[in-house]
Image (cartoon, rainbow, N blue to C red):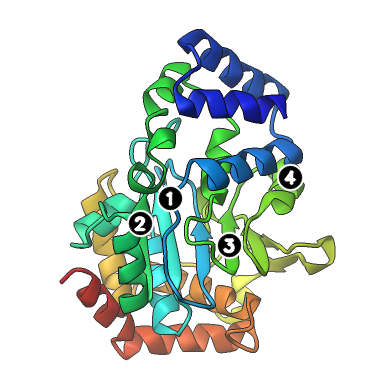
């Protein structure tokens, strides 16, 4: 399409600043449409991305906002570690200082936990096979996209690019869970997801995938019939006062550490709940209560923490 051609010119460096600005304005004005989200994601995956090589299957892609969290805890690293400890390998990806939020990212938290976050795609693939979890930065697997950040900051508004970057699925995972907030665009994202076999959308905290005890979360399948509303109270999760960490990756890393170390806290509740639900969505657990029990056991046994220690060694 014309829009995909324009994105190719921008990523290839042949577009002028004025043309790039006009493209971003046009995308902002007309909003997100399913065909363009899919087209942009496919274009990036085919021409502007170096895939993460691996032989892991099944594999889950956690497609979370690249601009991070600013009001709630960034717990995706602990969720990924717990999923891997339950036998479901996870690919994580992101970038730093992404507009418009520029919040605390999974990469920043992993860095504070001692995990290398500047791996090449090949190195990330090695870690994925060794540990069952890996992180790769867009700066390494799609550098032309990463190089757009200054221009996106000058524009200063959220665009369709914020949605597309989540969906690039650098390891070509079989399964995908996408965090997304805006209800009116759910169908567009549903049509554009890139999990090879199955994909779900979680309307979690700040448009990410974390599900909070004491608050219902909507989960959308690939068809309308598959959509569900998660009620944590019905699963025995009483609402706690969740810790609102300082806007500092170290504070978020501390919460992830508490959860992975099986300390009794609201972060552990969220990690167990989120992990258990995801396990059940893909049949890695027969139902949500069984998934939650598996997650709790993975934390209590030290398996999740052992994976973190391996990743940070």
Residue 121 bears which disc, if any? Answer: 2
Residue pointed to by mark 3: 177
Which x, y percent locates residue 16? 48, 11
Which x, y percent locates residue 300? 33, 88
Q: Which residue is rendered at x = 48% and y = 41% of the image?
A: 48
Mark with earlier residue (3, 4): 3
Q: CA distance from mark 3 to mark 2?
A: 21 Å
Give the SS element for disc 4. helix
Pick the front one: 156 or 6: 6
Quarter where residue 194 is shown:
bottom right
Task: Name the side, left or right, on which 263 lies relative to 95.
Answer: left
Q: Are marks 3 and 2 in contact (CB under 8 Å)?
A: no
Task: Name the side, left or right, on which 256 lies relative to 7.
Answer: left
Q: Are marks 1 and 2 in contact (CB under 8 Å)?
A: yes
Mark with earlier residue (1, 2): 1
**Image quadrant where one finds the C terminus:** bottom left
Q: Residues within 10 Å of mark 3 (few under 14, many from 20)?
A: many
Q: Which residue is rendered at x = 61% and y = 59% of the image?
A: 202
Q: CA distance from mark 3 to mark 1?
A: 21 Å
Which x, y percent locates residue 78? 36, 68
* Residue 175 position (above or below residue 68): below
Pick the front one: 16 or 309: 16
Quarter where residue 87 is shown:
bottom left
Give the SS element for disc 1. loop
Of badges 3 and 2, the one in the foreground is: 2
Residue pointed to by mark 1: 50
């Amino acid at each position: 399409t014309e829009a995909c051609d324009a994105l190719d010119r921008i990523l290839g460096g042949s577009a002028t600043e004025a043309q790039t600005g006009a493209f971003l304005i046009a995308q902002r004005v007309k909003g997100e449409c399913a065909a363009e989200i899919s087209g942009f994601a496919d274009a990036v995956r085919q021409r502007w991305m170096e895939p993460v090589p691996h032989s892991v299957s099944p594999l889950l892609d956690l497609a979370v906002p690249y601009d991070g969290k600013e009001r709630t805890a960034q717990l995706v690293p602990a969720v990924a570690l717990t999923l891997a400890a339950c036998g479901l390998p996870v690919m994580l990806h992101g970038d730093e200082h992404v507009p418009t939020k520029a919040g605390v990212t999974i990469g920043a938290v992993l860095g504070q936990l001692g995990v290398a976050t500047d791996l090449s795609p090949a190195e990330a693939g090695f870690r994925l096979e060794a540990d069952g979890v890996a992180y790769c930065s867009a700066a390494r697997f799609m550098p032309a996209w990463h190089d757009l950040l200054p221009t996106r900051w000058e524009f200063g508004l959220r665009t369709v690019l914020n949605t597309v970057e989540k969906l690039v699925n650098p390891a070509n995972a079989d399964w995908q869970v996408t965090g997304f907030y805006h209800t009116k665009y759910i169908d567009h994202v549903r049509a554009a997801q890139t999990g090879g076999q199955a994909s779900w959308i979680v309307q979690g905290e700040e448009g990410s995938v974390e599900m909070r005890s004491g608050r219902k979360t909507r989960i959308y399948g690939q068809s309308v019939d598959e959509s569900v509303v998660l009620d944590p109270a019905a699963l025995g999760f009483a609402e706690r006062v969740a810790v609102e960490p300082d806007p500092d990756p170290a504070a978020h890393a501390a919460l992830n550490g508490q959860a992975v170390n099986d300390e009794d806290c609201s972060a552990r509740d969220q990690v167990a709940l989120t992990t258990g639900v995801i396990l059940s969505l893909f049949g890695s657990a027969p139902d949500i209560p069984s998934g939650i029990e598996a997650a709790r056991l993975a934390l209590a046994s030290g398996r999740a923490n052992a994976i973190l220690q391996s990743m940070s060694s």
